[in-house]
Image (cartoon, rainbow, N blue to C red):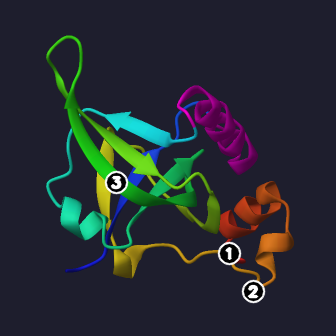
Amino acid sequence: MARLHLLKLCVGVATIAELESRIAQRLAENDGEQVHVTRVVPKRAADLLDGGSMFWVIRGQIAARQPLLNIRPFTDGDGIGRCRLVLEPTVIPVLPRRCKPFQGWRYLDEARRPLDLDGASGTDALPEALRIALRELCLL
């Protein structure tokens, strides 16, 4: 299997800190489980569950990711098929990369995924706004 990821716009969120705040709120509402509900069930679920993540686009930049734990299709009260994407509540910042807007979610191949900010480059100590600005100037 080839590792695969999902790419999703994080609408209404301006920073990684704001995303983390929303996650904390949802954890309290959902008995400690963080889920994201989507309308379409991914057809390549096996590849996604083989170490894949949900990458979040924040303000036009791929900015963070959350490991994907499970995919649970369900039918809502109106009879419409939907899907719960169960995510690890930990948000991992990634090296910001520009991303054009799109609807829904997109697959992201392992080879095209942004690298995690793991401390090796020292950029993770920079404020998020500065990292984004430096990336836009092609200095990161």
| Rendered image quadrant of residue 111 | bottom left
Question: In the rendered structure, does residue 96 fall within the stretch colored magenta?
Answer: no
Pick whichever, 80 or 128, lies toward us: 80
Q: Secondary structure at mark 1?
A: loop
> Disc 3 marks which amino acid?
Asn
How packed mark 3 is, by other alpha carbons closer than 10 Å (few <14, some 14-19, many 20 or more), is some
54 in relation to 112, above or below: above
The quarter of the rendered structure image containing the N terminus is: bottom left
Q: CA distance from mark 2 to mark 3?
A: 31 Å
CB-based contact (under 8 Å), mark 1 and mark 3: no
Query: Type of residue at label 1?
Result: Leu
79 up-or-down from 139: above or below: above
Give the residue number, with chain letter if any, for mark 3: 70
**Residue at 16% in and 21% down:** 80
CA distance separating discs 2 and 1: 7 Å
The residue stretch that appears in magenta: 13-31
Percent of width and height locating residue 105 = 32, 46
Camera-side residue: 46 or 104?
A: 46
